[in-house]
Image (cartoon, grey):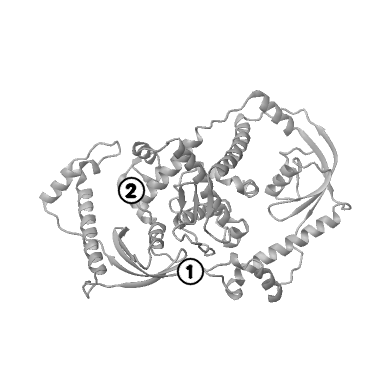
């Protein structure tokens, strides 16, 4: 699966779309290597859709979490860079935006009723086997997500799925027969695996710095924001029975059970008090905001200072996105809620992204330099030995026989066979995603008579990939894509 993802980075988003955004609990991961052009409020624009820094951060985090799960917790920033995860994240967003533009052109949308139906199927919000509103709020709060942010993202994912369902793909008997024939082509080969493990690389500062000079604009400091902020703690008050009853009567529809039935006052009491306390907290924060903005803040109110960025963000991506839209002429942000507390924020200054010095970037540059030089040397070795190598001879192999190539890990073996049966060369070499190179010489070829019983969904998957490739190309021609981010 990892091999497939690596080889198909360009279309990886097609499969990722189908999963919901509910990677709840996956922490945000930052990269700190970007700089903004003229449009600091957006990182890109696709058709009529603007993509924000918060969108990009969440896209990167989800991809990082998915890869980390596949690597069983062994995925790190070095691997993320080698996989081009930043570019994948931006590509995922732009491709999603292309589909959303298409959805808009057909006036497609996701209703609140559809959203509620979907939420009630998400088991991480269940309590005693059913969806529980309080559990829903608590789970999002623990992960620094607001209801608005989560529901907006979920609606977007549902709209993507709804749009793609307009393009159903089916398989036919003839297509299955053709694929069975392809799967029965078998090659007997002679092959040799080349690895960079024994290759030596000059890692002197002079060599590494020369490499850095050619791509130093890919190593940028973060955009940072110097701010002042006032934290409004949660307000907990004693509310009269009359006030509780009145609020309940005016807002009954806020308090429903898992089946959508309105709760009685007694059953809804805790929820009513929670809403009254939240309102009191917000009202207090608004009064503080007005006083602060007018320069009439009580001297007892504590004003805190901090410099924040994607990597150092005590808030969440949504709040950071709002901060990025502030300016010297409009530096104040109305109180925003986080975990039941409200924050009034003032932007002091924006610290732009800039190219890191060699010393600042050295630890990031070194592994990329070593990888690049080793890849170059390995390619030279492959080119020099491909016509005369002596290797191991195999029995007849089909594209499914990766487990029969003992000198390669199964993922590399599968990668090799897929490329081998796509090649038109009798003797050549194949570069694997792991970095290894396999020299090969096809000795003999024949067609087996096995019945593979290829499942219909294999045909559907192939046709879906082809359809998606064509769809993306068509939409790229229809909707303008503008990128306001350097180095990607």
The first of marks 1 and 2 along the sequence is: 2
Label 1 with label 2: CB-CB less than 8 Å: no
- Residue 459 picture quarter: top right
Residue topped by disc 1: 352
Q: Image height check: is 202 above or below 243?
A: below
Residue 27 visible within the image: no
- Residue 209 picture quarter: bottom right
- SS type, badge 2: helix
- SS type, badge 1: loop
Q: Residue sitting at 50 percent across and 32 percent down?
A: 166
Q: Residue sitting at 55 percent across and 50 percent down?
A: 91
Quadrant (top left, top right, bottom left, bottom right) of the N terminus: top right
Q: Position of residue 17 (x, y in %)?
A: 51, 43
Quadrant (top left, top right, bottom left, bottom right) of the C terminus: bottom right
Q: 72 or 305, which is in the foreground?
A: 305
From the image, state whether disc 1 or disc 2 is nearer to you.
Answer: 1
Residue topped by disc 2: 135
Residue 346 visible within the image: yes
Q: Image height check: is 85 above or below 442?
A: below
Q: Position of residue 422 (x, y in %)?
A: 74, 41
Q: Residue sitting at 62 percent across and 34 percent down?
A: 463
Q: Image height check: is 120 above or below 272?
A: above
Q: Position of residue 270 (x, y in %)?
A: 21, 50
Q: 185 or 460, which is in the foreground?
A: 460
């Amino acid at each position: 699966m990892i091999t497939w993802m690596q080889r198909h980075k360009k279309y990886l988003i097609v499969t990722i779309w189908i999963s919901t955004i509910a990677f709840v609990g996956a922490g945000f991961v930052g990269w700190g290597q970007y700089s903004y052009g003229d449009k600091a409020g957006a990182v890109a624009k696709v058709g009529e859709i603007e993509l924000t820094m918060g969108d990009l951060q969440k896209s990167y985090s989800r991809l990082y979490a998915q890869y980390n799960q596949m690597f069983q917790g062994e995925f790190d920033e070095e691997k993320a860079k080698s996989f081009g995860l930043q570019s994948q994240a931006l590509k995922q967003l732009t491709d999603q935006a292309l589909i959303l533009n298409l959805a808009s052109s057909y006036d497609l949308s996701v209703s609140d009723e559809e959203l509620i139906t979907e939420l009630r199927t998400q088991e991480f919000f269940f309590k005693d086997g059913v969806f529980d509103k309080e559990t829903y709020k608590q789970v999002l709060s623990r992960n620094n997500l607001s209801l608005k942010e989560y529901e907006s993202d979920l609606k977007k994912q549902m709209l993507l799925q709804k749009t793609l369902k307009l393009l159903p793909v089916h398989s036919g008997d003839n297509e299955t027969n053709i694929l069975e024939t392809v799967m029965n082509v078998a090659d007997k080969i002679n092959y040799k695996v080349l690895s960079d493990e024994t290759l030596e690389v000059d890692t002197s500062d002079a060599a590494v710095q020369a490499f850095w000079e050619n791509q130093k604009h890919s190593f940028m400091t973060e955009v940072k924001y110097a701010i002042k902020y006032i934290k409004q703690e949660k307000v907990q008050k004693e509310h009269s029975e009359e006030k509780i009853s009145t609020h309940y009567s005016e807002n009954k529809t806020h308090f429903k059970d898992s089946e959508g039935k309105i709760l009685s006052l007694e059953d809804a009491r805790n929820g009513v008090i929670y809403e009254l306390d939240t309102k009191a907290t917000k009202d207090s924060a608004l009064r503080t905001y007005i006083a602060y903005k007018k320069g009439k803040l009580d001297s007892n109110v504590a004003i805190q200072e901090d410099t924040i960025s994607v990597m150092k963000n005590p808030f969440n991506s949504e709040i950071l996105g709002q901060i990025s839209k502030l300016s010297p002429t409009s530096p104040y942000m109305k109180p925003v809620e986080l975990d039941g507390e409200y924050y009034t924020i003032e932007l002091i200054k924006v610290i732009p992204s800039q190219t890191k010095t060699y010393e600042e970037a050295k630890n990031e540059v070194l592994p990329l330099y070593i990888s690049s030089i080793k890849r170059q040397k390995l390619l030279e070795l492959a080119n020099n030995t491909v016509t005369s190598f002596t290797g191991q001879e195999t029995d007849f192999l089909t594209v499914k026989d990766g487990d029969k190539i003992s000198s390669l890990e199964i993922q590399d073996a599968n990668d090799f066979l897929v490329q081998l049966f796509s090649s038109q060369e009798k003797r050549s070499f194949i570069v694997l995603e792991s970095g290894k190179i396999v020299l090969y010489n096809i000795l003999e070829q024949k067609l087996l008579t096995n019945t593979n019983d290829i499942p219909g969904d294999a045909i559907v998957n192939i046709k879906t990939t082809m359809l998606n490739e064509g769809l993306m190309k068509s939409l790229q021609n229809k909707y303008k894509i503008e990128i306001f981010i350097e180095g990607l």
